Amino acid sequence: MSHLLEVSDLRTRFHTAEGTVFAVNGISLHLDQGETIAIVGESGCGKSVSMLSILRLIPIPPGEIVSGTARYRDHDLFQYTENEMEDIRGKEISMIFQDPMTSLNPVLTIGRQLTESLRAHLPMDKKAAEDRAVELLEKVGLSDPRQRLSDYPHQFSGGMRQRVMIAMALSCSPSLLVADEPTTALDVTIQAQITELVAQLRDQYHMAIIWITHDLGVVAGLAERVIVMYAGLIVEEAAVDELYEDPRHPYTLALLAALPRVDRRRDRRLKSIPGAPPNLLVEPHGCPFAPRCEYLIEHCKDDNPSLTQVGGAHTIACWIDIKTGKPR
Amino acid sequence: METTPTPFKIAAFTPDELEAPPLTLTQLTWRRFRRHKMAVFGVITLILLVAYAFGGALIFSEGYANHTDTTLRLNSPSTEHLFGTDTIGRDILARTIYGGQISILIGLIAVIIETVVGIIVGALAGYYGGLVDSILMRITEAMLNIPEIFLLIVMAKFFGGKIPGVDVFGRTYSGSVIVIVVIIGLTSWMYLARIVRAEFLSLKENDFILAARATGTSNSEIIFRHILPNSMAPIVVSATLGVANAILAEAYISFLGLGVQPPTATWGNMLDGANNYLESAPWLWFFPGLLILLTVLSINFLGDGLRDALDPRSRTV
Amino acid sequence: MTRYILQRLLQGIPLLFIISIILFVLMMSMGDPVATMGGRRVTRAFDYERLRRQLGLDKPIHTQYLYWLIGNDWAKVDLDGDGIAETTGVRHGVLRGDFGTSLVNRKPVMEVIGERLPNTLILMLAAEGFIILGSLLIGTYSALRQYSTLDHLTTALLFIGYSMPIFFIALISMYLFAVLFKRWGLPYLPTVGMFDPQVGKTTSQVMLHMILPVLSMSIVSFAAYSRYIRSTMLEVMSQDYIRTAKSKGLPRREVIFIHALKNASLPIVTVVGLDLPLLLGGAVVTERIFAWPGMGRLFLDHVSRLDLPVVMGILILIAAAVVVFQIITDIVYAWLDPRIRYDT
């Protein structure tokens, strides 16, 4: 049985004036119908670039998808023509983005921005598309939807704009939704609402979701599986409960330890990860996390560990067994 | 789960392995400029043009440039007169050399005038704000709304003949040169004034200005020693592009016969009346025109490169 | 939005006043005001004094400015110098359209200008149309083909066009399209005047004669605008909302010409307003070269004959036109940008 989405050894680079940026350095993942996975990692780890690469939304003069395949329903998206990709985007795979302030076109009405994807993908006339747009706005919880159609984005608040983005993304009932940090730019209370909304709609539409975030808290309530990325590579992948209970990669460990806990002792300092994220202008050599790792051995500097299974569906990329402190 | 980690062998990273060393500001600026191939081309061309106009004086004397010989009038380019001769037999090549000197000098001096005026107006308006700013800006706007060429034409005509000639560096310049320079300077300062004002408005809110004020630094010292040096980037770019504008302004007005008067040649006044000889003697207007084009083009390239190098965020028209 | 319009209009008034003061000072320092405002040169001392008093020139400078602006036909003038004002003035003032009479042909200045104004307007409108449409096209295609050889070539050509003096463009285009084309037996363009006197002032004649002048006038602005549109398009194309539009699978044409261009072309409206003074200046040079009977040529002719009333009249008119035009373009911009139009 094949997966809905299967990505294999994706590598993406950017050729800039300062040099080549090695953004994604060989990641593989898979996703099945109706499944929700989360991709977690700090800023710059390549999580957004990977997803944009799959949808081929990377600007190609500076960007380059060096290698890899992205099979959606058994067809490699990287082999599609641009026209074929246009059929996929918005209809089969939709994306919502982080900043609702800048992600909507300021000079076009909400109604236009909703109906245009409907009319691009489905045989609808203007009236039918508008009616559908009204339905969608209702579904995402906006009041006075018919009135809203002739409004402009700047007349909405951040949370409302994100709801509009979600309505737009869901308008043609896609099978896969990629959510690139959709709640990062919102207030905490709104964050909860939006996450709740997406969960609801997911069940209604039977969608698969890839949820990108750097917030481990959001992940817990939504995802079935979690992928942890660092410096353009996947370092750990596990079912969500197992990841929280039994993290095996030093980076995941450090991430979880860095979460401020309500029940920690007041006199203890907040744990942060020492060092800085790696310089992506340098071609990765050895394990990317090595400079900041507490479990470092000499071998880590020379050889990049590949993903190996450590039990069930749990994989990590590390030379050390953190339970024993010895190499595996 | 709190395990105290026992690393097997602590390996270390040298600082260089961790981070790329930063570049200094000068290095970054030079890098950006160098990448701008057109700017480099502009600089080279400008150097060649200046060498042509000023160095060429070593080959042809001014007397030769003004020497008329009506038997040779309107000759097409030949080995003796590379650019041909004009309506009264003067050698066009020599005239473009001496004309170039005037055109370039006018450009430079006019820019000095307009930069001084522009900085004063902009600094005062930006620094003091309030009523001073309102009045100065209204005047600036009013001047901007009157098209420059019209003002130039009117002022050149009506104030033109009033100043006597002057002798500098062994060359006699007719009074009209001075008038033109001053008029161009007085009608072009507005663009720079606005830029300087914008810089002052944003810079004066900085903490280092507050600190200067707190230690009792006088206003004029704050303006000239603290804020102005920090706003040099857009001033340099604007002044560079201003030279091109001044050269063009002089060319336009001399072309219309109201600028520098013959026998002093400028690239502009060599084109006066040239459209009467459009078909019969195209070399009359082609060479001076081409020289103007090359000069303005190189300055524009240079200014563009400077802007990218010094002030990359100000990318507007 | 209405508030913005009112604001803009109110801002324009002090501006116009300051412009009028500047021009008034200029005018007073440039020639004999008796001749300027009286419309004729007077030599006899007695007539000169009478005319001086009639025009109110014996009054203090601010009163003179007032009279210049709104006339003195509402005030009484002391014509015979006995200290008692008994005659009404004859001037109506600039605000009411009285710019005096031409020193050259004794006709009212407004009439003289009015004859030539439409001719310049045709040139300006055609030039503006060519500039806006042309630059939108070239700027967009240049932005889309960034880094290609075509883009580099276009950028270089635009730089050259932008750096050329207008008269050089005019002379070269005349040489190419009139002289050389004729030599090569190709259909060639006319270079003088508005129409061929033997054929008469027909629409096609005028349009034919317009081609070279409009081209010469427009190239510099066209090049500048194209570069500008290219850079605004490049900036817009890298915006998040374009990425959203692409992610919705919209056809590329729609993304570029509707999503992107609508945003990128907004600033052009303001640029059009700011560019008017330069375009007018270009008209002067162009009309001279092509002997086009417009306001620019009128200006030059009357400057050379020291006809100050006409010269001042034109200056005032174009300055006022620029102010008004800029107010209009600002309002149009505010109307086109929904963020300003619906600023609740």
Image (cartoon, helix red, strand yellow):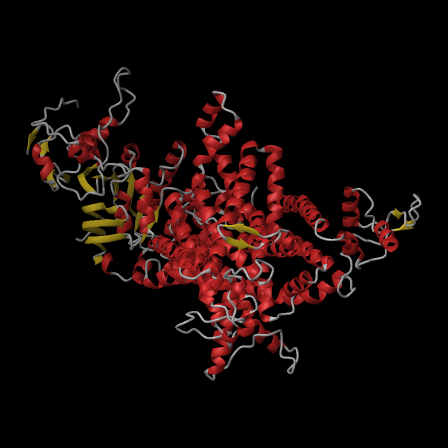
Image position of C339 (left or right of C302): left
User: Above or below — where is C245 with respect to B93?
Assistant: above
Vertical side of B125 occupied by A13: above or below: below
- Residue A260 vs residue B74: left or right? left
In the rendered view, does B115 fall on the left or right side of B22? Answer: right
A32 and C148: which is toward the camera: C148
* Horizontal and vertical percent position of residue C1: 61, 46
Image quadrant for the C terminus of chain C? top right
Of C202 and A171, nearer the camera is: C202
Q: Position of residue B15 (x, y in %)?
A: 19, 32
Q: Looking at the image, is C154 positioned above or below residue A157?
A: below
Q: Residue at x 61, y 39 (%)?
A: B136
> Can residue A147 be seen here?
no
- Closer to the camera in the image, C246 or B198: B198
Q: Which residue is the extreme one toward the top?
A: A267
Decide which of A186, C315 is in the foreground and name it.
Answer: C315
Q: Picture coordinates of residue B26 (x, y %)?
A: 32, 40
Q: In the displayed structure, does residue A255 sit left or right of residue B162?
A: left
Q: What x and y, as percent, mark residue C190?
A: 56, 77
Above or below residue C215? Residue B226 is above
- Residue A152 visible at all: yes
